[in-house]
Image (cartoon, rainbow, N blue to C red):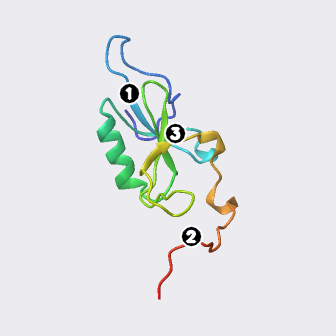
């Protein structure tokens, strides 16, 4: 599949009885859902995201069942506790980093000294 091909991330280009595709889709609205990687292996698709987009939701995974997941290597819970690096993701709620509200220090932030 061409690296710059734009397709419906929920559509599959395989026969109905074959395995579905796991698509890595760019999230930014200007990219219009461009698929940058596609594989029948979910682990290879996740590995691609972990290597190319480790710090946020610039790209997300769309599984053959239509589930969307995003990866953040430094994801944390509401009060700073550890959280799973892969989580469900709603691409329509994505906010471009330049428009996101900056989070200041709070009582749960990490501190030195």
Looking at marks 1 and 3 on the same chain, the residue that comes earlier in the sequence is marked by 1
Provide residue 102's location: percent of width, then percent of height.
66, 67
In contact (CB < 8 Å): disc 3 and disc 2: no
Q: Tag 3's secondary structure?
A: loop
Q: Residues within 10 Å of mark 1 (few under 14, many from 20)?
A: many
Of marks 1 and 3, the one in the foreground: 1
The image shows residue 47, relative to residue 113, as above or below, that is above
Cα distance in 3D space between marks 3 and 2: 37 Å
1 and 3 marks in contact (CB < 8 Å)? no
Residue 60, percent from left and from top: 48, 43
Determine the residue positioned at 50% across, 75% down: 110
> Nearer the N terminus, badge 2 or badge 1?
1
Check disc 3 and report the residue beneath it: 34
User: Few, some or many C-alpha atoms within 10 Å of disc 2 (few <14, some 14-19, many ≥20)?
Assistant: few
How far apart are labels 1 and 3 at the CA level? 15 Å
Q: Residue at x 56, y 70 (%)?
A: 108
Between 12 and 101, the one lying in front of the other is: 101
Q: Crowding near pointer 3: few (<14 within 10 Å), some, many (20+)?
A: many
Instruction: State the SS at label 2.
Output: loop
Camera-nearest label, 2 or 1: 2
In the rendered image, residue 46, in percent from the top left (x then y), is placed at 36, 43
According to the picture, the residue beneath numbered tag 1 turns out to be 21
Q: CB under 8 Å between callouts 2 and 1?
A: no
Q: Which residue is mark 2?
A: 108
């Amino acid at each position: 599949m061409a690296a710059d091909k734009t397709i419906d991330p929920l559509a599959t280009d395989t026969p109905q009885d074959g395995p579905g595709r796991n698509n890595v889709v760019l999230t930014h609205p200007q990219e219009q859902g461009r698929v940058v990687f596609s594989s029948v292996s979910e682990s290879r698709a996740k590995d691609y995201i972990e290597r190319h987009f480790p710090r946020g939701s610039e790209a997300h995974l769309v599984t053959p069942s239509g589930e969307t997941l995003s990866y953040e290597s430094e994801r944390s819970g509401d009060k700073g506790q550890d959280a799973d690096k892969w989580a469900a993701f709603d691409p329509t709620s994505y906010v471009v980093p330049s428009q996101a509200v900056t989070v200041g220090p709070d009582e749960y932030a990490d501190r030195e000294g």
